[in-house]
Image (cartoon, grey):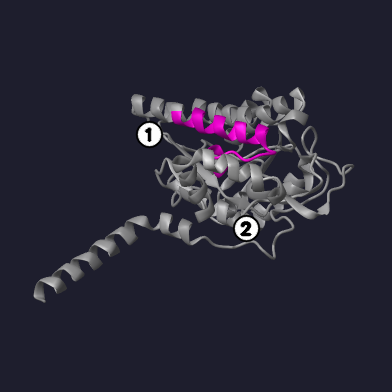
Amino acid sequence: MADRQQKPEVVVVTGASAGLGRATVRAFASQGAHIGLVSRNRERLEETKKEVEVLGGQALVIPTDVADADGVEAAATAVENAFGPLDVWVNNAMVSVFSPAIEMRPEEYRRVTEVTYLGTVYGTLAALHRMLPRDRGAIVQVGSALAYRSIPLQSAYCGAKHAIQGFTESLRSELYHSGSKVHIAMVQMPALNTPQFEWVKSRLRGRPRPVGRIYQPEVGAEAIVHAAHHRRPEIYVGYPAVEAIMANRIAPRLLDHYLGRLGFESQQAKEPDDPKRPNNLWESVPGDFGAHGRFDSSAHDSSLQLTATEHRRGLALTGLAAAGVLWAWRRTR
C-alpha cells in the first residue's frame, strides 16, 4: 500500500458518480488522493471531479461500463498512466431490479449479474494484474448484508452479492497460499440513503425504499476507507447488518417465513411508483444526483458499531485494563 505521507494515494472507484461511490470518492479526496472515476455517466463524473479538486485531490474521468472487461482493463491502464501505480481499487458499481422472481426476464438477470458481480470480478482482476507483481495494494469489495441474508423482490441483486462473497473468499485463500501482501476486504453494507431508489428498475406498486435502519452514504464510505488501510478481511457496517447476518446463521428458515410475511411491504413506500420513470439498468439516467437519496430526514450519519470496529484494539485494551482494576479491587476486598 502507498505511503500516504510521501505521495498521494492512487485510487480507483467504480460507480463513482453517485451514491456510495460519490461519498467514497469524497472521503479519499479529502486525504489528497488521486482518483480514477469510473461509471457510465460522463456528466456526473465531471461534477464529481470538481468536488475532488475542491477537496484537495486530483481526478481522472473514465466513462466505462464495468460489464465490459476490456473497458475496465483500459480504465486501470489510464489511471496508472496518469497517476502512477495503483494503491487501492474499490468495486462499488451495481444495478438491481425490484421484482418478483417469476416476473423477471432472463436478460435482466444477466445484466444485473454482469454489472454487479462480473463488474467486481473484472475490476479485481485489473487491480491484481498490477498489484501482484509489486506485492502491494488493497482491493475493497462493496458488499451487503444481502450477501449473507437474501430478501424477496431482489433475487438478481442478492444472487450477485452472494457471488461476490464466494469469489472474494476463494481469491483471499489463494493470496494467503502465495504469501501475497495484496490485501482484499469486503465491506458488508446496511441500508443506505442513496439515489439508487430513484432510478432502479422496479415492478413494485409503491416507490422502492431501503429496509430497516437507514444510514447516510458517508458512513459506508468511512468503512471503505478504513478497509483499504487496515488488514481486516471483512467489515460489517451498522448493527442491522450484523443482526441480519447473525440471525441468518442461527435461524435461516425462520427468517424465510418472516421476510415472506413482511419483506414485500417493507421495501415499498406508501406513495405509488411511476411505471414510466427512467431506470438505469441498461443506460445511465441523466442528471447529477449527488450522494444522498430522499431519506435524509430518517438516515443516521454515524454508526456506533462501525466506530467500535474501527477502534476495537483500543476498546479491547480498555476492557482488559478495566478487568484488571476490578480483579485487583476484588482481591483487596
What residue appears at the point 48 percent right and 48 percent down from the top-left corner? 236
Q: Is residue 163 magenta?
A: yes
Under tag 2, what secondary structure? loop
In the picture, measured across the screen, residue 266 lies left or right of residue 1, that is right
Quadrant of the rendered image containing residue 71? top right
Task: Identify the residue at the far left of this view.
Answer: 332
What residue appears at the point 69 percent right and 53 percent down from the top-left corner? 291
Which residue is label 2 attached to? 216
Residue in the foreground of this view, choosing between 127 and 329? 329
In the picture, measured across the screen, residue 302 lies left or right of residue 206, that is left
Which residue is label 1 attached to? 181
Label located before the other in sequence (1 or 2):
1
The percent coordinates of residue 237 (x first, y second) are 51, 51
Marker disc for residue 189:
none
The percent coordinates of residue 123 (x first, y second) are 58, 31
Is residue 306 depicted above or below 284 in this figure? below
Type of amino acid at the residue the image marks with label 1: Lys
In the picture, measured across the screen, residue 186 lies left or right of residue 333, that is right
Q: Is residue 328 magenta?
A: no
Quadrant of the rendered image containing residue 51? bottom right
Residue in the foreground of this view, choosing between 320 and 263? 263
Residue in the foreground of this view, choosing between 42 and 10? 42
The percent coordinates of residue 229 (x first, y second) are 44, 47
Q: Crowdedness of circle 1 by 10 Å Cα count: few (<14), some, many (20+)? A: some
Type of amino acid at the residue the image marks with label 2: Gln
Please tell me whether the stretch drawn in magenta is mainly helix, strand or loop. Answer: helix
The percent coordinates of residue 213 (x first, y second) are 60, 57
Q: Specify the segment rendered in magenta.
A: 144-169
Under tag 1, what secondary structure? loop
